[in-house]
Amino acid sequence: MTQRVVVYKNLPEDLLAQLKARFEITEVDSVDSDGPFAAAMAQADGVIGGGLSLPSAVLDRASKLRTVATVSAGFDQFDVADLTRRGILLSNTPAALTETVADTVLMLMLMTARRGAELAEYVKAGQWQGSVGPDCYSSDVHGKTLGIVGMGRIGLAVGRRAKHGFGMNVRYHNRSQHPAAEEALQAKWLPLDDLLRECDFVCVLLPLSAETEKRFSMREFALMQKHAFFINAGRGRVVDEAALIAALQNGQIAGAGLDVFENEPLDVASPLLKLPQVVALPHVGSATHQTRYDMAASAVSNLIDALEGRLPEFMVNPQAWKRE
Ligand SMILES: NC(=O)C1=CN([C@@H]2O[C@H](COP(=O)(O)OP(=O)(O)OC[C@H]3O[C@@H](n4cnc5c(N)ncnc54)[C@H](OP(=O)(O)O)[C@@H]3O)[C@@H](O)[C@H]2O)C=CC1
Ligand SMILES: O=CC(=O)O
């Protein structure tokens, strides 16, 4: 019998065609617990999408569901233990986006320290009337010390750019040491508090988990140097945003470059948007045409492999893998 797949939100036409050639497809563009999405999921063998969530009421009815292919690297929107218990394999797309997210992180570092957005606005507003003085000066990036919290795929790609492109010294903090980063970047592992005290840039690339939620709070910002910049492209909820705002307002740190927020989209009334030393991006770490296509292609291939009995390349909970 033909297997059924729910496609959540758009996929590029050629990739959708690959799925249509193999499976019966239902396309949906919003998640619900008792509407068209839930009804389609009740019949589905697989589901694919970015920004997808799976309410337990939907999973309770989805008795045939065997695999979920998220078009993202992060998977904090899923209860992985629950999926595993139900025997549902979750796959993700980490490799496709690594280099693009690393580019975004470097952009945030440069825009924040060199005041890129602020100074471009100054020119557009017609304020550039003569040679610039100290009010337009900014901070160097090259040669400074970068602390990466969450030295994984993206952290390593950021570290390479920082070390080899900008001559930065790289420090990092993970639960375990990362020998490849130590060898390739002469990166030094530090306890988190030491990293915060020592670094000119603190760059967070942690996944969101029970362990990392609100890892950065008043205490952590107080440990940072006053001239240091805080960059977050991991997940917003890893940071206590109110504490970050206070640290910026009180001059405890020099600035912040943020691609992710506690609540997204960021409320236009957020105090973050009133601070000139903050660069806020709309969660676009991986958002280039090519990378978004590559992520979708990776997710499609994960889904097809899982439903056709082959081991997908990227599995979050391989213990749920069951060969039919
Ligand atoms: N802004 C954006 O658009 C994007 C954001 N992301 C975010 O970036 C995150 C990282 O992606 P990626 O580099 O591919 O993931 P990886 O899994 O390769 O790296 C994550 C690193 O974090 C470390 N880590 C995990 N938990 C902890 C902890 N409790 N304390 C200290 N270190 C920890 C891990 O090391 P160890 O296990 O040794 O602790 C690991 O090396 C994603 O989970 C996602 O949230 C990803 C893509 C795009
Ligand atoms: O935040 C994006 C992701 O792919 O994870």
Image (cartoon, grey):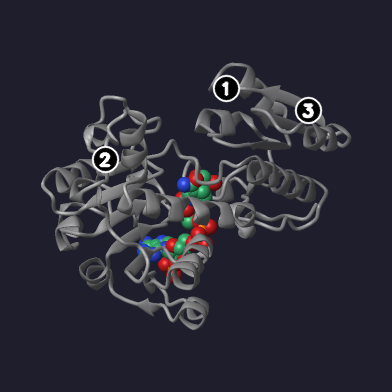
The location of residue 94, given as percent across then percent down, is 59, 54
Query: In front: mark 3 or mark 2?
Result: 2
Secondary structure beneath dot 2 equals: loop
Residue 129 position within the rendered picture, expressed as x and y whole percent measured from the top left: 27, 35
Q: Quick check: 273 left or right of 57?
A: left
Assign a secondary structure to mark 1. loop
- State the residue position of label 3: 25
Q: Closer to the N terminus: mark 1 or mark 3?
A: 3
**The disc labelled 1 sits on which kind of residue?**
Ser
Q: Which residue does the image show at 29% across and 36% down from the upper left?
A: 128
Quote the CA–CA distance across marks 1 and 3: 15 Å
Answer whether residue 74 is visible to the viewer in this image.
no
Q: Which residue is found at the position 19% from the left and 51% from the top?
A: 134
The 10 Å Cα crowd at callout 1, few under 14, some 14 to 19, many 20 or more, is few
Q: Position of residue 223 (x, y in %)?
A: 16, 63
Q: CA gap, disc 3 to disc 2?
A: 62 Å
Pointer 1 residue: 30
Specify whether 30 is left or right of 127: right
Separation (CA) of disc 2 from disc 1: 53 Å
Q: Amino acid at mark 2?
A: Gly
Q: Quadrant of residue 67?
A: top right
Q: Are marks 1 and 3 in contact (CB under 8 Å)?
A: no
